[in-house]
Amino acid sequence: LAKTTQPISMDSYEGQEVNITCSHNNIATNDYITWYQQFPSQGPRFIIQGYKTKVTNEVASLFIPADRKSSTLSLPRVSLSDTAVYYCLVGPNQAGTALIFGKGTTLSVSS
Amino acid sequence: EAGVTQFPSHSVIEKGQTVTLRCDPISGHDNLYWYRRVMGKEIKFLLHFVKESKQDESGMPNNRFLAERTGGTYSTLKVQPAELEDSGVYFCASSQDPRDGYGYTFGSGTRLTVV
């Protein structure tokens, strides 16, 4: 499975937009890009998934350029409760293939 | 709908003892995954079931770990005998088709401490 690279940590203030970029240079043709959020003492929580271009849901937006070698998770107007670890994963390239987690990005939001 | 349920939430056992972790996936989800996070490390894949069959067990650390999913419903992960390095948080996740825009649903995990 493709390896991903993300910043280890990011800091932000309440109300700001946060963009977390993930690189995945070896992404396979049929891999999807999925982002998860994890709070302490909880399991990871699905945020958003995309294959190409832009995907938006009620929580976030995901921007994927044409070459798909990177992706950017955009969190609009973050709040203190968005402080968490964010994981970028690529795959599964077929239904049921296990996802592999990297180190993730620790986002700290301050008031 | 009910989420993924894991039991127990915490377990403290002595080295050499046996512990069994349980995971109840979302009803109807054929895919069930076990992951583990050791303190300070990344979340590591352990095992993947499709219904009752082991699709991929390449992440299982050694033969002290035994996972089962009888009947394709709930799953158990047994550690016997437990060692100190087995301490960590064990997560279970389930999905029907993880490309359907909903990804995996994870449980809250079982925190295992071996002393």
Image (tube, coloured by chain):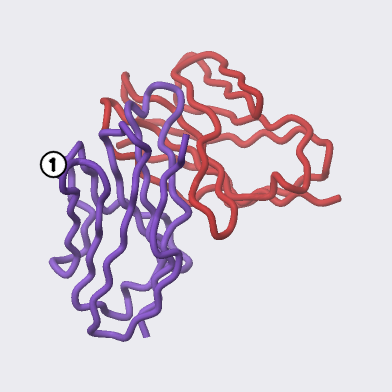
Q: Position of residue A38 (x, y in %)?
A: 55, 49
Image location (x, y in percent) of residue B113: 40, 76
Which quadrant of the rendered structure holds the N terminus of chain A? Answer: top left
Q: Chain of mark 1?
A: B
**Above or below for A64 versus B11:** above
Q: Which quadrant would residue B53 be assigned to in this image?
A: top left
Q: Is residue A46 left or right of residue A81?
A: left
The amino acid type, in three-letter code, at marker 1 is Ser
Residue drawn 23% across and 84% down?
B16
- The residue lying furthest to the right in this view is A111
Q: Quadrant of residue A13?
A: top right
Helix, strand, or loop for circle 1? strand
Q: Position of residue B88 (x, y in %)?
A: 40, 68
Q: Is residue A20 left or right of residue A22?
A: right
Query: Which is more toward the observer, B98 or B10?
Result: B10
Number of marks in picture: 1
Which of the chains is red?
A: A
Question: Which residue carries the number 1 mark?
Answer: B53
Write down which chain is painted purple.
B
In the rendered view, tell whether residue B64 sits above or below residue A60.
Answer: below
Tell me the residue at 43%/33% (across/down).
Answer: A24
How many neighbours does mark 1 have within 10 angstroms: few (below 14), some (14-19), or many (20 or more)? some
Q: Looking at the picture, tell me which residue is in the foreground, A44 or A63.
A: A44
